[in-house]
Image (cartoon, rainbow, N blue to C red):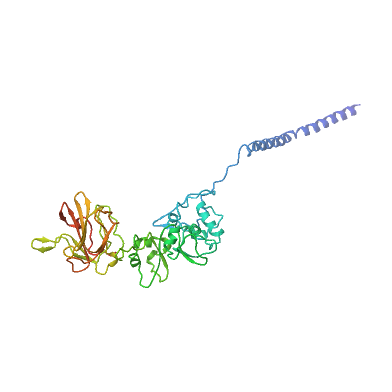
Amino acid sequence: MLRDRLLGLLGARSSLRARSHVHGRLPVRAVFHLLLIGMAALAALLTAHLVTDAEPAPVSHIPPVPLSGVRAIAPTGEAFLRPGVSHETLASPLRASLASFAASLRPTGNVETDDTLSDEVADVYAASQDSGYESRSLAEIIDPTRPYELYTVRGGDTLLAIALTYDTTVDNILLNNAEVVDAGSIPVGQQILVPLGEVEGILYKVGHGDTIARIVSRFLYVTVQDVIDHRPNNLYGGRSLLVGEYILLPGAEPPVQTPAGYVIGPPPPVSASRFGLPVAGWSFISDPFGTDRGGGRIHTGIDLAFGGVTAASSIYASCDGWVSRVEWLTWSYGYYVIVDCGEGWETLYAHFREIIVHRGQSVTKGETVLGISGSTGYSTGEHLHFEIRYNGQYLNPADYIHFPYSRAP
């Protein structure tokens, strides 16, 4: 009995020890469970901050890029043109005209047709491709590297279509192709010289001994600098002219002949003052104002000698006004013209070989040709005697106009 009770007590203690051992593991399990709960809570918190449809993901910054189609930026003087950013196919600010754009940008490689371009340029390019004309790169259309295209007429061609394709005008084509009589119909196979770009002018074929100055002297309204500055001529850096090449004379007009057959030369430089030079150039000043002529008389004007400068012998009005007198004398002034400049001012031009204005005609400074220089009257050689008067008093022209001793036309 006693033994059973002892065994019972021992069994109870054993049971208590066993239960106590299990309870001894509860803290470890609690920590493990808490850790799992914490991780689940952290995952829920992170999920709450993930991107939803209502909160779009931020877009990374798009770096600026040059305008489509421009491979490089060419320097203009000391500065570089920096075009704006274009990421879409929009009306491009590449050009207000092909001429102004060509002065600023020069793509260094061929431009593909799927690049972003202004509608106007794209239309010109498409016309050159679709109508069967000679294929040219879009870069060459935008910024031509030569001043002309020798085009062979094909069936169905018109001058208007050709002009639109090469971005010029019908008048500009006619100016450079005297053999084209009917602008509406041109024979198939005929070759036409087409000036490239919007700048109008005359294409000149360089001959032996030609210089830019000599070429320019044969035409009106163009200067040496105009020819050099026209980019397609590629005359930068002092490059010499090549015999047989064509250069464009921007804005030039062919010389005009007077009724007697003399060629009208180029006009003098533009002046902002009341008076301007009456002639583009001369060989030297043969007699200045005030030279003593004896007997109390002085030379009342300035004499500009021409010698062999025949292209510069067209005499222009030195002021705005009207022709108040025209005389054809065989002595003294010879053939001469007086222009009333208004407010008491007058200018006189003497020793013409031909006068082409009439009394009462309005004249414009630097634009109206009065006549051709000569040696009529009291003269020992071809020259212009030029006077400025105020209320009948003779004044020194050199006080109102700069006359270098000599001036090349």
Front residue (pair 85, 325):
325
The answer to whether 304 is drawn above or below residue 34 in the figure is below
In the displayed orientation, state which residue is furthest to the bottom.
208
Residue at horizontal 29%, vertical 65%? Answer: 260
Image quadrant occupied by the C terminus? bottom left
What percent of the width, then of the height, locates residue 2? 90, 27
What percent of the width, then of the height, locates residue 230? 40, 60
Residue 107: tell me if it is visible.
Answer: no
What percent of the width, then of the height, locates residue 63? 52, 49
Residue 30 relative to residue 170: left or right: right
In the displayed orientation, state which residue is furthest to the left.
295
Q: How many marks?
A: 0
Front residue (pair 399, 53):
399
The answer to whether 391 is drawn above or below residue 237 in the figure is above
The answer to whether 29 is drawn above or below residue 235 in the figure is above
Residue at horizontal 42%, vertical 71%? Answer: 244
In the displayed orientation, state which residue is furthest to the right.
1
Residue 14 relative to residue 291: left or right: right
Front residue (pair 195, 114):
195
What percent of the width, then of the height, locates residue 110? 52, 60
Residue at horizontal 39%, vertical 65%? Answer: 235
Q: Quadrant of residue 221?
A: bottom left
Image quadrant occupied by the N terminus? top right
Q: Quadrant of residue 265?
A: bottom left
Residue 270: tell me if it is visible.
Answer: yes
